[in-house]
Amino acid sequence: MWLEGKRVGIVGFGNIGSRIATRLEAMGCIISYTSRQRRHYTPFTFYENVLQLAFESDALIICCALTKDTHHMINNEVMSALGRSGVIVNVARGAIINEAELVKYLVAGKIGGAGLDVFENEPNLSKELLGLDNVVLLPHQTAFTKESFHDAAQILVGNLEAFFTNKRLLNLVTNELPIPR
């Protein structure tokens, strides 16, 4: 199996990141992660920041939220740390990666490849990405599964029940935008 023994770093270790880790571990990958906080329940190695994680990874999978702190977090310094054979997969939000820098690194062969389900300026796609052989592009569809729609419906029902019984909501929505658009 070509994944066996690969060092995969996961950026963001919430529900999605931890599920990806479980699946990749079953395929023989060595998993490490960075997140806002260390998860003491997991056997995976924690790194304080994404740069340290990139130095120790063959691939980075981006699963974190887009905030002021994570905007362009995957920059030329992180890409350099990942190296010429490194791969970046983004299933989170496009602006977490500095897409202009990513294109430069991909074209110059300074990074091995990228798998992108999201883009910095959606729905507009960087035309440079279309012609590259070391990139896999998807139209922002990783969440479109029966299971994800079921999970979203369960959260909706749970939040409605909590609201009408004056209990704490399962996930709060605020009027604060993660970053200015």
Image (cartoon, rainbow, N blue to C red):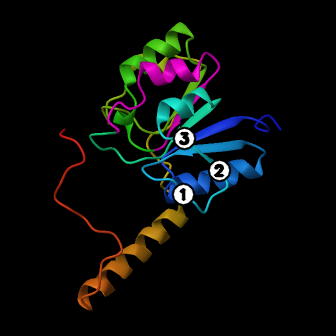
Q: Where is mark 1, residue-wise? A: 39
Disc 2 packing (10 Å; few <14; some 14–19; many ≥20): some
Q: Name the secondary structure under disc 3.
A: loop
Q: Are marks 2 and 1 in contact (CB under 8 Å)?
A: yes
Chain part drawn in magenta? 70-91
Q: Which mark is residue 137?
A: none
Three-letter code for the amino acid on which mark 2 is drawn: Phe
Three-letter code for the amino acid on which mark 1 is drawn: Arg
- From this view, report whether residue 161 is shown above or below residue 64: below
Q: Where is mark 3, residue-wise? A: 47
Mark 2 to mark 1: distance in Å?
A: 9 Å
Mark 3 to mark 1: distance in Å?
A: 11 Å
Asked whether residue 151 is in view, the answer is yes
Q: As rendered, which of 41 and 119 lies closer to the eye?
A: 41
Residue 52 lies left or right of residue 102; in this view the side is: right
Earlier-in-chain disc, 2 versus 1: 1
Q: Where is mark 2, residue-wise? A: 44
Q: Name the secondary structure under disc 1.
A: loop
Would residue 101 be counted in the magenta stretch?
no
For image coordinates 43% across by 19% down, the residue present is: 76
Q: Name the secondary structure under disc 2.
A: loop
- For residue 153, which quarter of the picture? bottom left
